[in-house]
Image (spheres, rainbow, N blue to C red):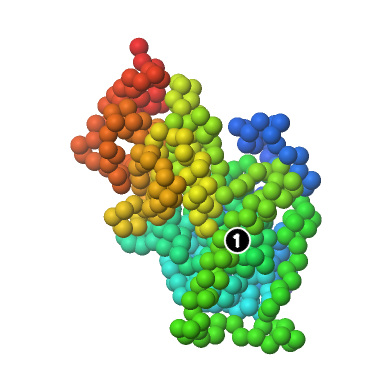
């Protein structure tokens, strides 16, 4: 094109759209012959009815695609790293005429949640996205959304809360809002983040639930890393999600109502009890929706995932992307006869305490890994709740709460194996466990080349060097 030629307004707009699209990872068939869910036997997989397409994309791209396929009514948003790409991509879909979602650019995260609440109360299917301080800025609105029983969805790309200032991943943002009355579901992979969003409205809009949901996935680790995934055809997604037909909404002229009224002492407690019942009901609804989704896609989900737990003596309980490194550690230790396993908590709200205790009851020791501090003196958010559930179930299993990955600190396969070593040594030495250890904390006195001698029936050593494992002589 000649430099002297003047572009029309329409040509300039299309040029800008093309420039945005050029910076996104293209949705193409993956050339890699990757086996998905390699550890799940083919005989155990359900052949889904949806058309699956093998693809590769980042977590943000995958969730943006899920938003496009669901085609919600309203999306207000204010950009904050690392969730910024979500409103960027969705607004591009809208500009290209691919969906008819009403996008509302607002001046802050507080306003984005306020607008989402207004849209949902009016009868629209609404969502927004944020991270870290953006969630903190929404604070009062989170409680309003939950108490008004609005089934809206928030894509929370997990990022550390300041301070000190940090833009990397941990779960301090989500854990700070864990008692706000929102459902919370966490993803390990890009594909799981995609699936979680597609299932979200089916859960939140169920008449027995009617609570908002946070679809959480790890910032930069999941949001920006590109992975092979399988996506679903749009017709199957929309048929699965269905049309939103609210029973009570502000624009219903046949049933005048108020949203968010003042509730003084004689009424306030009843609203909290009602929210609690919705949270309790959500467990069954989540499992029902997951079972239906399995029939659609062949992908199995639940309140949590058990990985090689059938005969595990030592178990790690963890959430989010770090489950991947832990699975690798489990596989490597299993090669040497160490009976280890892992539980990945997928649903944190409602907390599946009784179910987790049942899954752990045969273990000899358990490690609970938190990616957020609570400064309670009694453990992190996951540690405190799971220990309480184990106590209620009458389990007297040595259990240690660890903190890992704070502020984006790396969590490696070797460190996961060190955690297994630590809880195994507690059993072998019959020790009282020391609590609240920081995984990967810099310590000038740490003996990095120490040999950990396992003299039990498994007969192996672990050394923190090389690939981390060697067989005893």
Residue 246 image offset from top left, x and y in percent: 71, 73
Spot the residue most to the left.
Answer: 445
Q: Is residue 458 left or right of residue 359?
A: left
Quarter residue 281 falls in:
bottom right
Residue at position x 72%, y 50% in the image:
292
> Residue lying furthest top in this view?
473
* Residue sitting at x 29%, y 24%: 451
Depicted 210 relative to depicted 314: above or below = below
**Residue closer to the observer: 294 or 11:** 294
Along the line of sight, the residue nearer the viewer: 245 or 471:
245
Q: Between 161 and 23, which is closer to the camera in this rendering?
A: 161
Left or right: 432 in relation to 97: left
Q: Residue at x 74, y 71 (%)?
A: 245
Q: In the rendered image, is residue 442 in sight?
A: yes
Residue where numbered disc 1 is placed:
281
Find residue 237 and report its horizontal and vertical position in percent. 74, 55
Q: Is residue 77 left or right of residue 375?
A: right
Residue 363, horizontal then vertical, whole percent:
44, 35
Does residue 355 sit above or below 177 in this rendering? above
Q: Quadrant of residue 43?
A: top right
Q: What quarter of the picture does the C terminus occupy?
A: top left
SS at badge 1: helix
- From where the camera sits, is residue 173 visible? no
Residue depicted at 56% across the width and 58% down the height: 215
Decide if residue 437 is on the left or right side of residue 372: left
Q: Position of residue 257 (x, y in %)?
A: 65, 86
Q: Quadrant of the N terminus?
A: bottom right
Neighbours of disc 1 within 10 Å: few (<14), some (14-19), many (20+): some
């Amino acid at each position: 094109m000649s430099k002297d030629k003047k572009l029309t307004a329409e040509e300039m707009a299309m040029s800008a759209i093309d420039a945005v699209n050029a910076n996104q990872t293209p949705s193409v068939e993956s050339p890699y012959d990757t086996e998905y869910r390699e550890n799940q036997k083919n005989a155990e997989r359900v052949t889904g009815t949806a058309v699956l397409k093998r693809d590769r994309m980042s977590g943000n791209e995958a969730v943006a695609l899920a938003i496009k396929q669901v085609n919600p009514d309203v999306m207000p948003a204010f950009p904050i790293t690392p969730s910024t790409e979500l409103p960027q991509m969705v607004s591009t879909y809208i500009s290209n005429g691919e969906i008819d979602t009403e996008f509302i650019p607002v001046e802050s995260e507080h306003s984005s949640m306020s607008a989402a609440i207004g849209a949902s109360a009016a009868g629209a299917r609404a969502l927004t996205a944020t991270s870290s301080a953006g969630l903190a800025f929404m604070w009062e609105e989170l409680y309003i959304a939950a108490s008004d029983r609005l089934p809206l969805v928030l894509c929370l790309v997990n990022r550390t809360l300041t301070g000190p200032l940090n833009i990397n991943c941990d779960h301090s943002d989500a854990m700070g809002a864990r008692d706000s009355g929102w459902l919370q579901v966490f993803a390990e992979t890009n594909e799981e983040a995609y699936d979680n969003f597609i299932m979200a409205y089916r859960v939140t809009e169920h008449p027995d639930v009617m609570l908002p949901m946070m679809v959480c996935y790890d910032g930069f680790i999941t949001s920006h890393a590109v992975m092979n995934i399988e996506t679903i055809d749009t017709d199957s997604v929309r048929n699965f999600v269905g049309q939103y037909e609210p029973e009570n909404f502000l624009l219903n002229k046949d049933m005048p109502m108020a949203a968010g009224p003042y509730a003084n002492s004689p009424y306030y407690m009843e609203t909290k009890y009602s929210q609690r019942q919705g949270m309790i009901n959500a467990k069954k609804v989540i499992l029902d929706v997951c079972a239906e989704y399995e029939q659609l896609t062949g992908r199995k989900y639940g309140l949590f995932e058990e990985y090689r737990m059938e005969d595990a003596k030592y178990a790690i309980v963890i959430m989010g992307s770090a489950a991947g490194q832990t699975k690798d550690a489990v596989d490597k230790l299993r090669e040497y006869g160490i009976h280890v396993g892992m539980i990945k908590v997928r649903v944190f709200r409602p907390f599946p305490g009784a179910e987790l205790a049942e899954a752990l009851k045969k273990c000899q020791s358990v490690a609970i890994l938190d990616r957020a501090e609570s400064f309670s003196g009694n453990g992190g958010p996951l540690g405190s709740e799971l220990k309480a559930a184990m106590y209620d179930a009458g389990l007297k299993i040595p259990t240690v709460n660890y903190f890992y990955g704070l502020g984006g600190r790396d969590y490696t396969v070797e460190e996961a194996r060190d955690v297994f070593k630590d809880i195994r040594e507690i059993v072998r030495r019959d020790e009282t466990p020391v609590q609240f250890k920081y995984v990967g904390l810099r310590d000038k006195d740490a003996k990095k080349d120490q040999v950990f001698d396992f003299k039990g029936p498994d007969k192996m050593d672990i050394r923190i060097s090389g690939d981390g494992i060697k067989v005893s002589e």
